[in-house]
Image: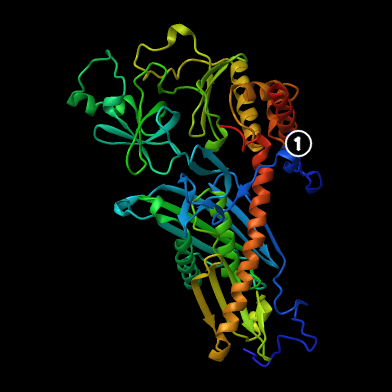
Amino acid sequence: MSTNAAIELALDRVDWRDLAAHADHLPRVYTPGEILMPEAGFMRGHGTFVEDENIKASVAGVIQKVNKLISVRPLKSRYVGEIGDVVVARVSEVQQKRWRVDTNSRLDSILLLSSVNLPGGELRRRSAEDEQMMRRYLDEGDLISAEVQNIFEEGTLSLYTRSLKYGKLSQGILVKVFPALVKRRKMHFHNLPCGASVILGNNGYIWISPTKGQEQEGGEGGFALNLNEHIPRVDREVIARLRNSILALAKCKLMIYDTSIQYAYEESLKYEAHELLQQNVIYDIGEQTQARLRDADD
Amino acid sequence: MASNFELLSEQGLRLDGRRPHELRHIKCKLGVFEQPDGSAYMEQGNTKVLAAVYGPHQAKGKKTESNDVIINCQYSQATFSTAERKNRPRGDRKSLEFKMYLQQALSAAIKSELYPRSQIDIYVEVLQADGANYAVALNAATLALIDAGICLNEFIVACTASLSKSNIPLTDISHFEEVSGGPKLTVAALPTAEKIAFLEMSERFHIDHLETVIETAMAGCREIRDILEAAVKEHLLHMGSAADWARVC
């Protein structure tokens, strides 16, 4: 049996720094303990603290000013939820009247039994049987898409899936990137022209699945799994290519949203799907996508 | 231990050719792994350390009741890290001691009030041990915490110092100087606030010199802080600005 092995030499190592912005717009970066400004007249936001009447940074990142609110945004961190965010999450525990789910945030998130759509209509009372059936709806390890409904005092997120677009995810691929890379937009569900759908979770979890036909959606309250359905090879290749393109964007630290994914996918077409794992190919895709995004901006 | 050995030559140079106040060459890199939330690699002379940070995440077990952050460290040395090849199990006394010291120093820097009911795991692995292992491990852990975006009061850095026979303080001692019988003082400090988070001494010297030796170590800390800060800024500028990350949202 012959296999193709790619051997990377240290000599050909890709220098990711070349992808950096134009030298003239380099942002001002602050590091922990650095003084941002005197406290007088300003409010301290995330990533800052007050000491000796000065506002100081507590994380390494760029400064963000909203009126008088000063905050510092780090490049990488755990997901900090906001109400209304779309997230992709994994169920980690079934408890009484609620599920505990992992959303890549600081604390586990909660999905209450009362904030899911149960089969059989919107206005149904939650009975004791429903509590016993909870594992039937969502079991440990299941993936769901949901929206952040509320944030508790300590930072725990409460999610809900009471809309037909949210619910259990069946066949597809989960890609994890860091949350800051997913751009906040109006739309986080996209049916891409290449024949696959993506859900861009604000928490950095991205779900890629084959585009469903209209008639299959809804009905079961979003708890139906169609694991028996056969996905043709062509679709699976598109999904695999999309996954590698998204990972390439993440590796180049490019923002992830529908346009950038589309560009990266188009740039990737000149390679085989498996070649997209090689460093120089990733770099090339990053560079081309970045150039196209900047052209579109100007 | 042969304590007659002179650490400083007549020309005022140390065994590896450094001047008394000179640090070893420092090289560091952030974000070396994809899987953890933050990671860093740090080289100080021939001492090489990898650090990885997971978290903050939900504290597991009965620890969840506590309202403070749980800082969980692990210190280990690779089998091949010293001249003598030796299997070093994680639970041995020396690494447990270092682990406690790391926890103690890092809890002085992490803003624990921001992370109730959470846990931060810090794993440090020494790849090559050539003196000042604890200090380099702590510096690497600091970089990894910054890479993970965890809120800190400021950089926490550590440096070692020693005293030569002729009572001249030496900064950042190497393994050879460590075993030559001189005293060894390790300081972990918050350099801007000039606070000492951790202090350890082995062997002894006259108390009159204590102040100058601590001051030497503190000066080393300030110098290391500046190097680390420059490294963090350069990393963020190059890694972050590809996406025009500073402009969006």
- Apparent side of residue A212 relative to residue B29 in the rendered image (left or right): left
Q: How is the image coloured?
A: rainbow
Is B106 placed above or below A238 here? below
Amino acid at the residue labelled 1: Asn
Quarter-of-image position of residue A297: top right
Q: Which residue is mark 1?
A: A280
The x and y percentages for residue A271 are 74, 25
The N terminus of chain A sits in image quarter: top right
Which residue is pictured at 67% across the width and 39% down the height?
Answer: B241
The x and y percentages for residue B116 are 36, 50
Give the letter of the chain under mark 1.
Answer: A
Quarter-of-image position of residue A134: top left
The x and y percentages for residue A3 are 73, 34
Q: Secondary structure at mark 1?
A: helix
- Apparent side of residue B114 relative to residue B144 in the rendered image (left or right): left
Which residue is pictured at 77% across the width and 82% down the height?
Answer: B13
Which residue is pictured at 68% across the width and 29% down the height?
Answer: A274
**Residue located farthest toward the front when viewing the structure as drawn:** A41
Nearer the observer, B206 or B102: B206
Residues packed near mark 1 inside 10 Å, few (<14), some (14 to 19) or many (20 plus):
some
Residue A57 showing in the rendered view: no
- Apparent side of residue B221 relative to residue A25 in the rendered image (left or right): left
The x and y percentages for residue B173 are 65, 76
Is B3 placed above or below A228 here? below
Nearer the observer, B105 or A4: B105
The C terminus of chain A sits in image quarter: top right
Which residue is pictured at 47% across the width and 71% down the height?
Answer: B97
Residue B214 showing in the rendered view: yes
- Apparent side of residue B43 relative to residue A97 in the rendered image (left or right): right
**Residue located farthest toward the top when viewing the structure as drawn:** A215
